[in-house]
Image (cartoon, helix red, strand yellow):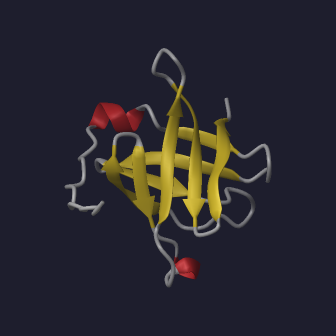
Amino acid sequence: METRWRPVANRPANAVDLSACRGRYRSPETSAVHEIAVRDGRLLIQMATGPRPLHWLPADPIAPDTFRFRVAHAEYTKPIALRFRRAGGGAIVGLALALNRSRWLEFVRDG
């Protein structure tokens, strides 16, 4: 059976979708803390919000609740995928990140 792949247009996120994503997210596994913000209609992520945080990075929507972004020290790899997790009522309760061999590292909403 032949598999046929078709390109899919990026799904633009609206301001309501983005504002629900704002907040701090902590990984129970690694204790890393990342922050999500919205500026000028774009979702931004700041990784490692400790004493030496990285710059705010823009994330592009690729599917519902799913974004992709790049970091400078991983420029020769695929972009990092970020997927928000929702509770049964639709509220965002966490996110997961995937990059290369790290598949869907879970983060919970912090506060």
Name the residue nearer the viewer: 80 or 8.
Answer: 8
* Residue that appears at 58% across and 54% down: 97
Q: Residue furthest bottom?
A: 76
Residue placed most toward the observer, 7 or 110: 7
- Residue furthest top in the image: 89
In the rendered view, does 63 fall on the left or right side of 77? left
Q: Nearer the viewer, residue 9 or 92?
A: 9
Residue sticking out furthest to the front? 1
Locate the C terminus by quadrant.
top right
The image position of residue 68, as x and y in percent, is 42, 59
In the image, residue 55 lies at what x, y percent? 54, 67
Q: Name the residue rendered at 21%, 61% in the picture.
A: 7
Q: Residue at x 27, y 63 (%)?
A: 2
Q: Quadrant of the N terminus?
A: bottom left
**Residue 34 horizontal side relative to residue 30, left or right:** left
Of 85 and 37, the residue lying toward us = 85
Q: Is residue 111 above or below residue 43?
A: above
Q: Is 14 above or below relative to 12?
A: above
The image quadrant of residue 65 is top left
| Left/right of residue 90 with respect to residue 16 in the rendered view | right
Residue located at (28% from left, 42% from top):
13
Q: Quadrant of residue 25?
A: top right
Relative placement, left or right, of 29 versus 56 is: right
Q: How many marks?
A: 0
